[in-house]
Image: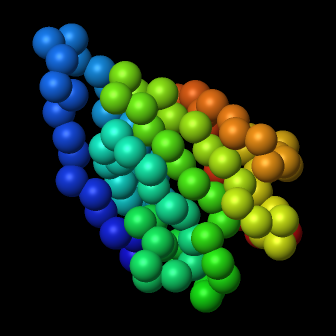
Amino acid sequence: MPQLLAPVTPPSATRVAQSSLRIGDERCPLPPGTHALGGRAADAVPLAALGNQPRAAILTVSANGVTVLQRTTASIVVRIDGETIGIAPIELHHGARIEFGD
C-alpha cells in the first residue's frame, strides 16, 4: 500500500491544481517537492509490484504544479503511456500512465 502524502495548498493567491498519483483505486496527493518511487518502504511512494528493488524513479513537483519524472536506474524499465523512457527528465501531463517492469 502506498504511503499517502498530505495535500498542500499552494501559498499563492492563485490556486494551482494538486498533483497526485493514482495507484490502483487509491489517489495519492503529491505536495511540491521530490518524491522517490521504488520497492522499498523508505521510498516516499513504495510500490509493492517492485518487490525490494531500489528506487526506480524520482517525481519532482514544482510549486506551480509542473510534475517531472526522472528514471534513476537502468535495471528497471520505466514507460510513460506505453513508451520506454531513458534517463532524461520528462514532464508529465494530466492522465499520464507510468509503468514499471518488463
Which residue is found at the position 20% from the left and 40% from the top?
Answer: 8
Answer yes or no: is residue 97 visible.
Answer: no
Looking at the picture, how far across and down is residue 5, in whole percent?
28, 57
Which residue is found at the position 77% from the left and 41% from the top?
Answer: 88
87 w.r.t. 62: above or below: below
| Residue 89 quadrant | top right
Relative to 92, 17 lies left or right:
left
Looking at the picture, how far across and down is residue 65, in whole percent?
40, 28
Figure quadrant of the N terminus: bottom left
Looking at the picture, how far across and down is residue 67, in whole percent?
51, 35
Which residue is found at the position 18% from the left and 17% from the top?
Answer: 12
Name the residue furthest bottom. 52
66 w.r.t. 50: above or below: above
Figure quadrant of the C terminus: bottom right
48 w.r.t. 71: above or below: below
| Residue 14 quadrant | top left
The colour scheme applied to this rendered structure is rainbow
39 w.r.t. 60: above or below: below
Relative to 40, 29 lies left or right:
left
Q: Which of the pair 34/27 is nearer the observer?
A: 34
